[in-house]
Image: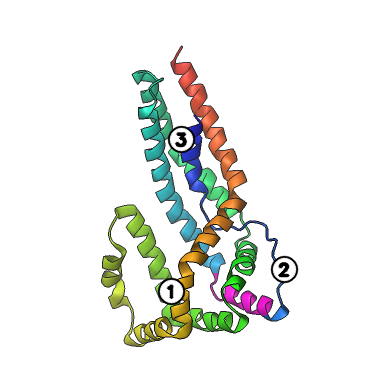
């Protein structure tokens, strides 16, 4: 049962930060980060991100939990069948509980906290302002939407992201492509290519810590329901 709960908790990896223990930020940095968060308009894009990720992660949880049931030597074949049926029945309810929790998050505040915790470790205020200018461009905004679509499609189908980008490339104008190439080859763009993976890892950890308590409650609730179903089936 503990392993089942652990698999169910995979759903918890979404956007939200842990509490910060860093030194207070300088006003210049705080203002730069405020504009950096605002330009990304996350309140509008977040519901789509949540829905896409929830569908993918629930599929992963179902697959993992079903595998754990199959590997549990202490369960009879009938108990395994009962458990697998329960998992399939509960999947839509689990997805809805997760989505409801995520929709209730104050995304702007969470992202602000995350940005103030993570980004000053890697960039100064001027660099943050350069990011803001780039993120406010039409080319970047279009690229950000397409990147999310590619992430979701790749995770769902297993198709290579590079191949997907080639397919989507025709959606960009020559000017937009030139702008993105110029940023990627700039000093800040090259710096971000190195720092980006580290920042992403810190943000994921930051997110997990804030969402984990509530997600654990959800996983425990359904884990207890599964235990009751298996107990009833064994009588």
Question: Residue 126: where, in percent of width, then height?
Answer: 59, 84
Q: CA distance from mark 1 to mark 3?
A: 41 Å
**Residue 93 visible (yes or no):** no
- Front position in the image: 66 or 97: 66
Q: Nearer the viewer, mark 2 or mark 3?
A: 2
Residues at discs 1 and 3 in contact (Cβ within 8 Å): no
Q: Earlier in the sequence, mark 1 or mark 3?
A: 3
Q: How is colour applied across the structure in the image?
A: rainbow
**Residue 105 visible (yes or no):** yes
Identified at 33% across, 79% down, the residue is 172
Question: Residue 128: where, in percent of width, then height?
Answer: 57, 79
Residue 194 lies, with reference to residue 161, above or below; the image says: below
Identified at 46% across, 39% down, the residue is 7
* Chain part drawn in magenta: 29-41
Identified at 58% across, 57% down, the residue is 206
Dividing the picture into quadrants, the one containing residue 214 is: top right
Q: Earlier in the sequence, mark 1 or mark 2?
A: 2
Q: CA distance from mark 2 to mark 3?
A: 44 Å
* Residue under pointer 1: 193
Would residue 83 appear left or right of 20 to someone viewing this image?
Answer: left
Residue 228 lies, with reference to residue 20, above or below; the image says: above
* Residue under pointer 3: 90
Question: Residue 25: where, in percent of width, then height?
Answer: 70, 73
Q: Which label sits on residue 23? A: 2
User: Label 1's element?
Assistant: helix
Residues at discs 1 and 2 in contact (Cβ within 8 Å): no
């Amino acid at each position: 049962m503990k392993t089942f709960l652990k698999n169910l908790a995979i759903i918890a990896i979404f956007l939200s930060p842990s509490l910060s223990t860093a030194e207070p930020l300088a006003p210049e940095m705080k203002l730069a980060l405020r504009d950096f968060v605002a330009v990304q308009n996350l309140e509008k894009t977040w519901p789509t991100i949540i829905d896409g990720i929830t569908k993918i992660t629930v599929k992963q949880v179902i697959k993992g939990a079903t595998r754990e049931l199959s590997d549990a030597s202490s369960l009879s074949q009938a108990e395994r069948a009962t458990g697998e049926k329960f998992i399939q029945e509960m999947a839509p309810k689990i997805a809805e509980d997760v989505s409801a929790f995520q929709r209730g998050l104050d995304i702007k505040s969470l992202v602000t906290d995350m940005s103030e915790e993570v980004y000053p470790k890697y960039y100064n205020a001027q660099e943050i302002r350069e990011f803001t200018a780039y993120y406010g461009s039409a080319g970047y905004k279009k690229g950000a939407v397409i990147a999310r679509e590619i992430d979701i499609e790749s995770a769902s189908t297993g198709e290579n992201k590079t191949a997907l980008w080639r397919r989507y490339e025709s959606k960009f104008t020559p000017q937009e492509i030139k702008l993105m190439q110029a940023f990627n080859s700039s000093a800040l763009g090259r710096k971000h290519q190195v720092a980006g993976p580290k920042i992403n890892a810190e943000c994921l950890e930051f997110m997990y810590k804030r969402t984990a308590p509530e997600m654990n409650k959800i996983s425990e609730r359904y884990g207890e329901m599964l235990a009751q179903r298996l107990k009833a089936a064994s009588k």
